Image (cartoon, grey):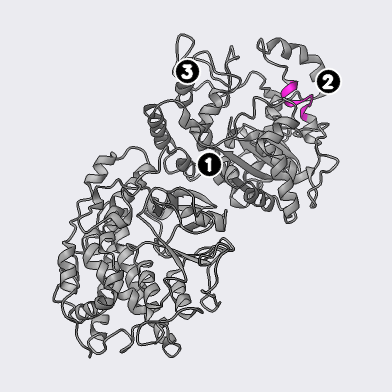
Amino acid sequence: PRGTSAASSFTQKITKIEGVPVPFWFRNDTFQRFRDLDLRDDDIILSSGVKMGTTWVTKILNSLLHDFDDDGNTTPMYMDDSFPNRLGQTYPDALFPSRDVLRREMADLMAKTPKGREPISSNFGDFVFDDLIHQPTPRLFSSHLFGKKLLPKRLFDGWVEQRDGTIATGPPSRGQRGKGRLIVVVRNLKDTLTSLHFFRGEPKDGWDGNEHGPGSFRRFIDLEDCPNAYGDSFHWIKASAEAVEAVGSDRVLVVYYEALKANVRAQLRRINDFLGLPPLTDAKSRAIADACSASKMRSETGGRFKYAIRKGSVGDWVNYLNDERWKELDQVFDDSLGGIDLAEPLRFFQQKEIPGMPLIPWQDCDLETDRRTWSPYLCVSLREGMVVPDPDIVHTNNAIKRILSSTFRLLSFSSKTPVDLDENGSDGSPRYHLFLAPSDPWASPILAAMKLLGLESKISVDISDGQSGAGWAFLNGASCAPWKGREGPFWLYEAYQLADPLCTTKILVPVLWDTVTERIVSNDSWEILKLLSTSSGSVTEIDDRSLFPEELKPMIEAMFSDYIGPLIDDVITAGLEYFRNDQNETERLQKGRINAYTKLLHLDSLLGTTRYLLGDTVTIVDLYFSAFLFQFDACYLDAFAFRGSDGFGEPILSGSCYPNLTAYARDMFQLLKPFVHFESFGEVFRIGPSIALTRQSCSSGGKSMDTLRESATATVPNLRDIIVFLEQPARESN
């Protein structure tokens, strides 16, 4: 080898199995027994990367399975180290096959143990492989072994038992169905490297190498000949991802170290449910969380795992090496793991700073602020509570599912449920809070409704300064509980995570937040606006009538579901399709434009006979349609390449194709002008470069950040001209 790693600085000779380096204590005989293991359906295989949380998760699993009862009391098995995995992991490939072999060969093993290294039994106990086989059910097998070539063959579909008792593998369709359950533990690779570097003290060749070797950093990113025990972490993750796919979602669970650190009790519930155990009680959850804390584990293991449990933190990597080194690791990550779903959540924790943050607060922007010069951001969503690149952006073949307005998975709110907007929180401030973004077509109508309904003193509001690599960002923080008083920035994903730590959702605005229950009431714009219009405490300023009058409700719902909602979706979807396909024309793009054009013609004809969409009364559906019209000429026409396309040869407002829409927009502008933030619409021009950045970051190669900024070539129209045009006299009525 070119050098020795922190994990194997004692190794004199590197042995490889299936091309993977293994530690000095590795035994091929017990490894083969593990591979041919007669798995049971309730067996648990824990596959965890080196320094990725193996000891911690092993303790968690034992606690859930054996150590605590539903009242949170310890069982007789707690701290009973008379069988494997009690105080930490017991690796199958480190054990002697039987006690007879242990007695015969222990002297040999002691002779091979590097000078200054404690006996192997002090790490794994005086166990043999037979002890693993006879452990209490459900059995737990904890290991750094990984992938289809190193894990038990019966775990995967397609295994066949041979006459000699060995197991052969074949196509999944021709053999037996897989057995057991697989839990894979993963950690961001920068913290993994840092923990590995300090494992058992710093290596002689340091981070960057010297006369003793290439250093921890070079060994870690060496994808061809990494000498570290169990190989390089990049291949470990890639092979694990293949194993996860092969086993299938019903028998596999991926646990991220960072998710455990962020909310251990939510992850306990997730693991408990996966194992099919009885519902996890609050008492048992609290007891396990305490027992599995780093400080408690260090004290109770009596130093046995002092090397295994270091800081147990997230983000410690920023204290070491320089930006050049970390960028080099980022490139290796992109080249080797780009596009692999298992790896995507790690990106968020391998960032020193959130990319694409807004440069200034939204209040400081004016009509001349050119957001095209701001850095692009990663388009992200939440997957089981983890911030990941948005799969609808990354994968071109995915159908775009209402990217700007899909419903929160578990906490969607029905407009039939009343909310008392006169209620206050514990500090006397309004109980309900809105997170909004004036550049979002689904959030901007809420701003107007707040004023028109007289709710400005009844609901507090935070307005986003723009998108970022962590979703909607609020540079000065959030002004509501529980984040009130915390220094900014605040990111909207934090509200989603607090409401449901395991949610899979897009990070959308608007969000109506309940400061008392600390839950999302709704993130569905249409439901929120109906809710505000019918809630106790709302008083309209328009002719003393509601924006959602009872007698018009069926017509309002029909107009929104048949025309206005789909129209906004058509335009947004067409624009995103344009950028997802590298600004090339596609059938889906053309269809979206034609659909939008057809609806606009219909609405223009309708507004030739009526002042507003449903007669002489402004309703909530008018707020959406007018907001869309204001934004179309100001941003969508050019940012989404509608100008010059079929049906959109000219602007809607100042062109000649839609005279009735023009008159209608002017009419609505007289009412809504104070709530239309043209200075924020430039945020839309960041979408194209940000989609390009997201797609390239999940694949190898790609353009530089400067090149991506330069690609934002769409012309920003003169916003002052649009405002002047809208300020022209409105029609009286029809």
| Residue at numbered disc 3 | 215
Where is residue 250 shown, x and y percent of the image?
62, 52
Q: Nearer the viewer, mark 1 or mark 3?
A: 3
Total numbered labels: 3
Residue 401 or 252: which is nearer the viewer? 401
Residue span colored magenta: 121-129
| Residue at numbered disc 1 | 241
Mark 3 closeness class: few <14, some 14–19, many ≥20 residues within 10 Å: many
Q: CA distance from mark 2 to mark 1?
A: 38 Å
Question: In the picture shown, does residue 365 fall above or below 531?
Answer: above
Q: CA distance from mark 1 to mark 3?
A: 28 Å
User: Dots 2 and 3: beta carbons under 8 Å?
Assistant: no
User: Which element type, helix, strand or loop, lies under badge 2?
Assistant: helix
Residue type at mark 1: give it: Ala
Residue type at mark 2: give it: Asp
Question: In the picture shown, does residue 728 fall above or below 643?
Answer: below
| Residue at numbered disc 2 | 100
Mark 2 closeness class: few <14, some 14–19, many ≥20 residues within 10 Å: few
Q: Earlier in the sequence, mark 2 or mark 3?
A: 2
User: Dots 1 and 3: beta carbons under 8 Å?
Assistant: no
Where is residue 438 shown, x and y percent of the image?
34, 63
Where is residue 486 shown, x and y percent of the image?
49, 49
Q: Is residue 125 magenta?
A: yes
Mark 1 closeness class: few <14, some 14–19, many ≥20 residues within 10 Å: many
- For the question of whether residue 667 can be seen, the reply is yes
Q: Nearer the viewer, mark 2 or mark 1?
A: 1
Residue at the location (29% across, 68% down)?
676
Q: Is residue 369 left or right of residue 57?
A: left
Residue 600 or 308: which is nearer the viewer? 308
User: Which element type, helix, strand or loop, lies under badge 3?
Assistant: loop
User: Dots 2 and 1: beta carbons under 8 Å?
Assistant: no
